[in-house]
Amino acid sequence: MSLHDEMTLAEAVRSAADALRTAGIEGASRDARALVAAAGHRQALDLIAQSEAPLGTGAAEHLAAMLKRRIEREPVSRIVGEREFYGRAFKITPATLDPRPDTETLVEAALEICGEAGAVQQPIRILDIGTGSGCLIVTLLAELPAASGTATDISEAALAIASQNASRHGVADRLRLRQADALDGVNERYDLIVCNPPYIPSGDIPGLARDVRCYDPMSALDGGEEGLAVFHKIAPRLRMALGGSTKLGWALFEVGAGQAVLVQRLFAANGFTAFRTWVDLGGHTRCVAIQSLD
Ligand code: GLN
């Protein structure tokens, strides 16, 4: 069946799913629903509640273009320009990393630490290094209603997207954005630092799946020879940026599979002694937290 604007949403989903399945796309039905909703400017729920409604004017052409991109293996989140993270929708562009479910481990770890310290309702200060879409800092500010934050990124284009996401989720008045590399120009101290740095060893980049290698910004992925370049930049200056007058003073880093021990060793060589780790849903140690109360 060819696509046309008068077909029902249910017909469009069936037809899109068939096209994706024929092209060998895994999860064809799920992707079809997401693309039909986006093409028709609908919510996912409309596809069920209004399944007999027409796809809508201009939507068939839009859907056909989206299906073509998906068949070329572009991720759905890139096609629709949006990704859900910790229950909230984040705008993404080619300038930002596509937030991954693994990174929610960092949010959970940060909220656990705040909960244990009785800081959930406290006016704590949070720094997000390399904010990208802003998924980490915006989520934390939304979950911690009295907190305020700073987010840095080397990419001005990424900061513009983080700013839009902060407005969308009602936290823009508690967030400052600053163009900076790692901890450059950061003079204040923070109760909590979060960072999902680029940590993929340069040599592993050519072997990455096409949907990562071709669509995520290289500066958000490439962590240098061992993958630890950004950790090396941050470690000698972390103490100055962390803690001060609070019981918190934790920096939480996302790490790649198998890097947790190396990262702890690197920070231990810089005088840090208190570490905690969290495991992601795939069983990999995904978050290393480092405390400094000086
Ligand atoms: N902080 C953003 C995220 O976790 C971007 C991280 C990055 O670009 N390496 O998705």
Image (spheres, rainbow, N blue to C red):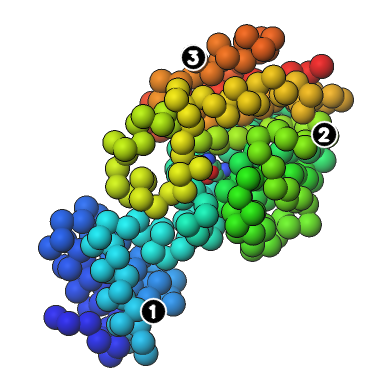
Residue located at (26% from left, 69% from top): 68
Q: CA distance from mark 2 to mark 3?
A: 29 Å
Q: Which mark is residue 235?
A: none
Quadrant showing the N terminus: bottom left
Residue located at (22% from left, 53% from top): 26
Q: Is residue 55 left or right of residue 230?
A: left
Q: Is residue 187 left or right of residue 59?
A: right
Residue identifier under label 3: 261
Tell me where residue 19 sits by quadrant.
bottom left
Residue type at tag 2: Asn
Task: First in sequence, mark 3 or 1: give its number.
Answer: 1
**Dot 1: within a 10 Å radius of its alpha carbon, few (fewer than 14), some, or many (20 or more) residues?**
many
Quadrant showing the C terminus: top right
Q: Secondary structure at mark 2?
A: loop
Residue type at tag 3: Val
Q: Camera-side residue: 114 or 273?
A: 273
- Give the vertical position of 195 relative to 116 (above or below): below
Q: Is mark 3 within 8 Å of ligand 1?
A: no
Residue type at tag 1: Gly
Q: CA distance from mark 1 to mark 2?
A: 47 Å
Tell me where residue 238 sits by quadrant.
top right
Image location of residue 133, percent across then percent down: 57, 52
Q: Which mark is residue 40?
A: 1
Residue located at (76% from left, 26% from top): 242
